[in-house]
Image (cartoon, rainbow, N blue to C red):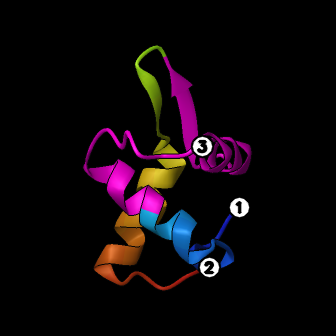
């Protein structure tokens, strides 16, 4: 499982933005990387945050300790 600190600053920023809704500025390379990590999924409307990605962002925002 990917931990918050395993992500680059750009990946963290992308996930936080995706958690708020569509992120049209997401590059194809970043989208592919986040999909590979399981943090994003391909949807008919574009790439969106996955359940695992959302949980990781929420845990970070509420200050939950990392496992």
Task: Identify which residue is drawn at 42% across, 52% down.
Answer: 54
Task: Identify which residue is drawn at 58% across, 49% down.
Answer: 39
Residue ID for mark 3: 31
- Real-space Cα separation, disc 3 to disc 2, in angstroms: 25 Å
Residue ID for mark 2: 67
Task: Identify which residue is drawn at 46% across, 58% down.
Answer: 14
Task: Identify which residue is drawn at 37% across, 62% down.
Answer: 16
Using residue 62 as the reference point, say whether residue 8 is left or right of it. Answer: right
Along the line of sight, the residue nearer the viewer: 21 or 2: 21
Lower position in the chain sequence, tag 3 or tag 2: 3
Tell me the number on the disc at residue 1: 1
- Secondary element at tag 1: loop
Q: Is residue 20 magenta?
A: yes
Q: Are marks 2 and 1 in contact (CB under 8 Å)?
A: yes
- Secondary element at tag 2: loop
**Magenta extent:** 14-43
**Mark closer to the observer (3, 2):** 3
Q: Position of residue 47 (x, y in %)?
A: 50, 32
Along the line of sight, the residue nearer the viewer: 26 or 18: 26
- Real-space Cα separation, disc 2 to disc 1, in angstroms: 9 Å
Lower position in the chain sequence, tag 1 or tag 3: 1
Circle 2 crowding by C-alpha within 10 Å: few under 14, some 14–19, many from 20:
few
């Amino acid at each position: 499982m990917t931990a918050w600190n395993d992500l680059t600053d750009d990946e963290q920023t992308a996930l936080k933005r995706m958690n708020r809704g569509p992120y049209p500025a997401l590059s194809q390379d970043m989208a592919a990387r986040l999909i590979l990590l399981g943090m994003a999924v391909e949807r008919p409307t574009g790439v969106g945050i996955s359940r695992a990605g959302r949980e990781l962002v929420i845990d970070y925002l509420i200050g939950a300790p990392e496992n």
